[in-house]
Image (spheres, helix red, strand yellow):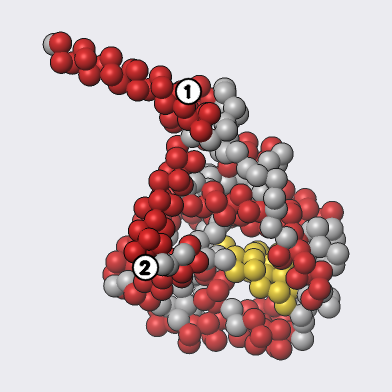
């Protein structure tokens, strides 16, 4: 019993010391504001390049876009200037930030903004926002973006989580602590033993852990597991999700800038066939189609296109090179069929 009491006393003392040390060490206010603490710098690369290149069409999406579109071929076939913003591992929250702080802030407004998405991704604002994803969001976010903080973070926190975030520094500063520890583990020994600096280590990690080096079954399993989040029952309730997502904001910004928004729903091999697709997802898409029509948004839906056969895919969501060429031509055909003004 005495040993347990000693343990409790030591734990309490250590927790108390850390509660004082952490805010001091990392210059964090106490009580800590809810939500991530974002810096004031906003990456403007896309804004500058859009202003300079003056594209007619801007494409936005994740690695699915990267694997699906040959930008030069598409531009040649459509006779349009195209700017491709395809970033691996991203989702709707980052797309919203890029649109808000880069695309619509550019000196040139494209005629069309095309977003490539999978199923419910556009209405799940807390998907891919934590951990290393938060670092990427911080590059394009401003600290006063209340819509971002509320919809991607606060709306998904319970009262105990909010209290711990504000008043328990060991919990509230977890991402800062994790980043510092991760940096030490990742960069210290290679720098000391091999003279390999941060850029050298990052390049080596990217070379070693790129998708091509993973066993196909392992890569497939990891992709399916990551996407499980967007197929939860709550995520497939369109009417409940849409108002708290970034989709209405994206639509509003496009309308204000006179940019035609086009959404491209991509096919995946997750369910194998349309018959095996969950009924909730079918209902979700029916409601989404009605919502988009009401808001003058064009939807190109390739989810059940029988021409996109499994042999065109490298894994459940990404095309191989043959698939890239085929889908680029397919998108051109569908785009021209819309008879959109140039």
Residue that mark 1 sits on: 20
List x then y, in percent, for residue 240: 58, 40
Residue that mark 2 sits on: 194
Quadrant hosting residue 171? top left
Residue lying at 63% horizontally and 42% vertically, measured from the top left: 38
Q: Nearer the viewer, residue 296 or 312?
A: 312
The answer to whether any part of residue 42 appears in the image is: yes
Q: How many marks?
A: 2
Residue lying at 60% horizontally and 69% vertically, measured from the top left: 86
- Left or right placement of residue 166 versus residue 233 in this view: right
Q: Residues within 10 Å of mark 1 (few under 14, many from 20)?
A: some
Q: Nearer the viewer, residue 226 or 1?
A: 1
Quadrant hosting residue 59? bottom right
List x then y, in percent, for residue 201: 43, 66
Q: How far apart are labels 2 and 1 at the CA level? A: 37 Å
The answer to whether mark 2 and mark 1 are in CB contact below 8 A is: no
The answer to whether any part of residue 287 appears in the image is: no
Kindly identify which numbered label has been placed on residue 138.
none
Q: Secondary structure at mark 2?
A: helix
Image quarter of the N terminus: top left
Q: Secondary structure at mark 1?
A: helix
Q: Residues within 10 Å of mark 2 (few under 14, many from 20)?
A: few
Residue lying at 55% horizontally and 86% vertically, measured from the top left: 325
List x then y, in percent, for residue 227: 43, 56
- Left or right placement of residue 259 versus residue 72 in this view: right
133 lies above or below 39: below
Frontmost of labels 2 and 1 is 2
The disc, 2 or 1, on the residue closer to the chain's N-terminal end is: 1
Q: Nearer the viewer, residue 224 or 88?
A: 88
Residue lying at 68% horizontally and 41% vertically, measured from the top left: 143
List x then y, in percent, for residue 58: 72, 70
């Amino acid at each position: 019993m005495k040993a347990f009491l000693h343990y409790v006393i030591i734990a309490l003392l250590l927790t108390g010391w850390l509660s004082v040390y952490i805010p001091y060490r990392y210059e964090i206010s106490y009580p800590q504001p809810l939500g991530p603490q974002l810096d004031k710098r906003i990456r403007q690369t896309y804004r500058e390049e859009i202003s300079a290149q003056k594209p007619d069409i801007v494409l936005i999406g994740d690695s699915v876009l990267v694997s699906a579109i040959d930008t030069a071929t598409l531009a040649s076939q459509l006779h349009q200037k195209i700017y491709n913003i395809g970033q691996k591992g991203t989702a709707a929250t980052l797309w919203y930030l890029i649109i808000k702080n880069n695309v619509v802030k550019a000196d040139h407004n494209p005629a069309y903004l095309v977003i490539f998405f999978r199923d419910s991704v556009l209405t799940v604002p807390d998907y891919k926002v934590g951990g290393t994803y938060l670092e990427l969001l911080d590059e394009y976010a401003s600290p006063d973006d209340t819509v971002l903080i509320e919809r991607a973070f606060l709306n998904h926190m319970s009262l105990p989580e909010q209290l711990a975030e504000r008043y328990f520094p060991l919990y509230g500063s977890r991402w800062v602590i994790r980043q510092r520890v991760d940096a030490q583990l990742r960069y210290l020994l290679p720098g000391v033993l091999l003279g390999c600096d941060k850029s050298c280590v990052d390049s080596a990690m990217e070379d070693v852990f790129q998708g091509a080096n993973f066993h196909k079954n392992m890569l497939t399993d990891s992709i399916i597991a990551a996407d499980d989040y967007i197929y939860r029952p709550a995520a497939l309730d369109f009417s409940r999700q849409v108002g708290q997502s970034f989709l209405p904001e994206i639509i509003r910004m496009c309308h204000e800038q006179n940019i035609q928004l086009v959404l491209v729903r991509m096919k995946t091999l997750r369910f194998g066939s349309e018959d095996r697709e969950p009924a909730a997802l079918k209902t979700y898409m029916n409601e989404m189609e009605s919502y988009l029509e009401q808001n003058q948004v064009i939807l190109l839906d390739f989810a059940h296109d029988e021409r996109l056969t499994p042999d065109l895919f490298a894994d459940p969501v990404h095309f191989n090179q043959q698939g890239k060429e085929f889908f680029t031509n397919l998108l051109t055909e569908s785009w021209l069929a819309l008879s959109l003004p140039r």
